[in-house]
Amino acid sequence: MHKRSKLSHKGENGKVLIIGGSDDLVGAPALAAMSALACMRSGIDLVTVFAPEKPGFVINSFAPDLIVKKFKDQKFSNKNVLAAIELSETNDVVLIGPGLGRKKETLAFAKEFVKKCKKPIVIDADAIKACAGMKFNGATILTPHEMEFEIFSEEKITEKNLAEKKKIVLETAKKHNCNILLKGHIDIISNGKKIALNKTGNSGMTVGGTGDVLAGLCSAYVSLGMELFDAAKKAAFVNGKIGDELLKEKGFGFIASDFIEKIPKWTKKILK
């Protein structure tokens, strides 16, 4: 883990670039903002969101702490790849996918960006579909639910038992040279060599946005210096622990934004 120096300056304690937000859905910009706020509350210095202009202004409204780099078009396309790559070079980690959208041009952008990005990268949501079948350079975390996993790997997993799922996730991570955090009742995490299970969390976490918080946590922990496999494990654990705490407090009435204020407490616990 990166040790924070008393003499450190802004940006020396973690910088994350988030690529996401669209006008496909009203809530899409909020999902990108949710990931960004999760990163900030994990203790990193700077979060930059790269988004189309219209959803970018919505993301700005969530917190003054977020830097939002907007471009004039209303959707991502291949002409935005160079600008995204240039932004990535000044950050430690990239998260792509929250609220990204499913337009053909957007998915083509995501695939091309991931191919060219030289930084560690967390791939979530629609960006997972864009990268179906791709082999990575190892510095990658995928955070799929079961349907996204099936699209990416072309492996059926929904009807399998836990032992079978573990084997499939391990083999898929090895084949595609990446880390996979398969979200579920029990999260399965693998880097193709090792495998881990996370049993924190509950059925209330099916509410929209909790996966975006998880992706933000993964990105922040990598930015703080964790190995990618460890970052994925700890992010799953923290996300689930917060969900369990909220279930005790609110029953099933909690929402994803409730997670944000509890992130510092649980991040502090795992960093001791």
Image: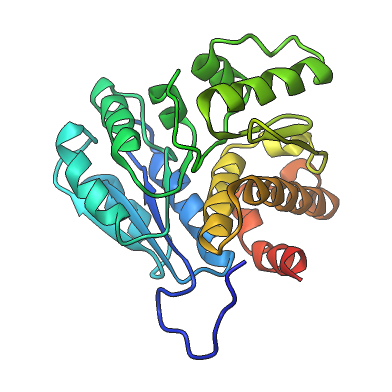
Tell me where residue 223 appears, x and y as whole percent. Answer: 51, 60
Query: Looking at the image, which residue is at 36% across and 54% down?
Result: 59
> x, y (%) of residue 71?
18, 48
37 up-or-down from 186: above or below: below
Residue 42 placement: quadrant: bottom right
Residue 52 visible in the displayed image: no
Q: Nearer the viewer, residue 179 or 235?
A: 179
Say which residue appears at 45% left-offset and 18% top-offset: 133
In the displayed orientation, state which residue is furthest to the front: 193
Q: Nearer the viewer, residue 164 or 78?
A: 164
Question: Is residue 101 visible from the viewing direction of this image?
Answer: yes
Direction from residue 95 to residue 258 in the image, left or right: right
Q: Quick check: 59 left or right of 221?
A: left
- Tell me where residue 110 appears, x and y as whole percent: 32, 32
Please indicate whether residue 145 sits to the left or right of residue 139 in the image. Answer: right
Colour mode of the rendering: rainbow
Residue occupying the far right of the picture: 248
Q: How many marks?
A: 0
Quadrant, the C terminus: bottom right
Image quadrant in which the N terminus is located: bottom right
Q: Position of residue 183 (x, y in %)?
A: 67, 32
| Residue in front for this viewpoint, 141 or 269 | 141
